[in-house]
Image: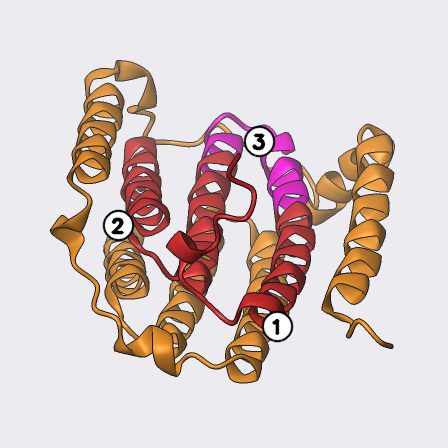
C-alpha cells in the first residue's frame, strides 16, 4: 500500500507549484488556473486523511470544496470578461483600480 | 502495485502542473491543467474514492475547463502570449515559495504521525451509500447553503458578463 505521507508530499508539491503560479505569473487567466491547482491539492489532502483515518467526512468536505470552486470560477470569469471589455488588458499589474 | 501507479500519476500531475505555470500561452496552460485534473482523479481512484473521481472529471474537466477555454477563445490573448515570463523577476515571492515548500515538506517528513501505511477503513457495506447518507443527514444545512451559493454565483456571472445596454 502507499504510505500516507506520499499523498501529503504530493499535495505539498502541487500546492507550492500553484502558489508559484499565483505569485509569479502576471496573466490573470493563469493566476485563476493556479488557484484551481491550489484547491485540488487541498482536496487530495482531505481525501487521503479521510481514507487513512476511516472517516467519510473528508470526501464530504472535498465535495463542498469542488462546489464552491465552481461558483468561484463562474464569478471570476464573469468579472474577467467585464474587465477585458472595459480595460482590454489581461495583465494583473494594469488592474489597479481599487488601489487607494 | 499501488505504489507504482501512485508514482506514475504523481509524476504526471507534477509535470502537468509545472506546465500550467511555465507555459506562455494560456491555451497550453488550460490544456495542461485539464491533464493535471485527470491525473488527480486517477489518484482519487487509488484512494478508493470513486465518486469523487467521477465528480472531479465531470465538474473540473467537463465544466470548469470548458468555461476557461470558452473565455480564452472569447477574449484576445495575443497580447498576453507576447509577454515573456521570467521566474527570477520577483525574487521576494520566489524566496517565500522556497521557504514555504521546505517548511511544509520538513514538517511532513519529520512528523511520525503521517507514516500510516495501512488505512483503517472498515469495509462495511457500500461506501457511496455511506457517503451520501452522511451528506444528506448530518450535512444537510451546508449542502443547502452550497446550493444557494451556486445560485447566487450563476446570477452574478450572468449579470457581470452582460452587455451594459442589454
Which residues, given as a range, are shown in magenta? A48-65
Q: Residue A61: give x, y in percent of width and height.
A: 63, 36
Specify how the rendered protein is coloured. by chain
Label 3 sits on a secondary structure element that is loop
- Residue A50 lies left or right of residue B155; in this view the side is left
Query: On what subunit does the disc labeled 2 rest?
Result: B
Label 1 sits on a secondary structure element that is helix
Label 2–label 3 contact, CB within 8 A: no
Say if residue B84 shows up in the picture: yes
Query: On what subunit does the disc labeled 3 rest?
Result: B
Q: Is residue A89 above or below residue B4?
A: below
| Residue labelled with disc 1 | A85
Image mark for residue B122: 3
Which of the two residues, B136 or B68, is positioned nearer the viewer here? Answer: B68
Q: Is residue B118 above or below residue A65?
A: above
Label 2 neighbour load within 10 Å: few <14, some 14-19, many 20+: few
Image point 65% across, 66% down: which residue? A82
Label 1–label 2 contact, CB within 8 A: no
Q: Quick one: which chain is red? A: A
Label 3 neighbour load within 10 Å: few <14, some 14-19, many 20+: few
Q: Residue furthest left?
A: B88
Q: Quick one: which chain is orange? A: B
Image point 50% across, 25% down: which residue? A53
Query: On what subunit does the disc labeled 1 rest?
Result: A
Indicate whether residue B131 is drawn in magenta: no
- Residue A22 lies left or right of residue A98; in this view the side is left
Q: Residue B143: give x, y in percent of width and height.
A: 81, 40
C-alpha separation, residue under disc 2 versus residue under disc 3: 21 Å
Amino acid at each position: 500500500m502507499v504510505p500516507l505521507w506520499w499523498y501529503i508530499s504530493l499535495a505539498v508539491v502541487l500546492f507550492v507549484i500553484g502558489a508559484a503560479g499565483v505569485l509569479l505569473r502576471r496573466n490573470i487567466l493563469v493566476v485563476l488556473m493556479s488557484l484551481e491547482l491550489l484547491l485540488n491539492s487541498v482536496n487530495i489532502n482531505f481525501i487521503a486523511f479521510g481514507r487513512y483515518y476511516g472517516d467519510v467526512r473528508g470526501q464530504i468536505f472535498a465535495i463542498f470544496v469542488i462546489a464552491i470552486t465552481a461558483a468561484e470560477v463562474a464569478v471570476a470569469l464573469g468579472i474577467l470578461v467585464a474587465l477585458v471589455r472595459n480595460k482590454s488588458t489581461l495583465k494583473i499589474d494594469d488592474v489597479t483600480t481599487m488601489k487607494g | 502495485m499501488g505504489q507504482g501507479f501512485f508514482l506514475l500519476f504523481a509524476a504526471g500531475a507534477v509535470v502537468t502542473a509545472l506546465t500550467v505555470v511555465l507555459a506562455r500561452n494560456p491555451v497550453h496552460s488550460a490544456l495542461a491543467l485539464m491533464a493535471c485534473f485527470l491525473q488527480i482523479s486517477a489518484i482519487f481512484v487509488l484512494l478508493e474514492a470513486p465518486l469523487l473521481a467521477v465528480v472531479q472529471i465531470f465538474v473540473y474537466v467537463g465544466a470548469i475547463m470548458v468555461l476557461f477555454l470558452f473565455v480564452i477563445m472569447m477574449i484576445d490573448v495575443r497580447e498576453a502570449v507576447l509577454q515573456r515570463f521570467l521566474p527570477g523577476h520577483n525574487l521576494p515571492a520566489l524566496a517565500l515559495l522556497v521557504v514555504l515548500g521546505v517548511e511544509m515538506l520538513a514538517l511532513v517528513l519529520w512528523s511520525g504521525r503521517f507514516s500510516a501505511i495501512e488505512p483503517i477503513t472498515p469495509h462495511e457495506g457500500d461506501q457511496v451509500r455511506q457517503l451520501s447518507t452522511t451528506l444528506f443527514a448530518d450535512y444537510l444545512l451546508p449542502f443547502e447553503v452550497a446550493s444557494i451559493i451556486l445560485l447566487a454565483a450563476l446570477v452574478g456571472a450572468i449579470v457581470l458578463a452582460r452587455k451594459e445596454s442589454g
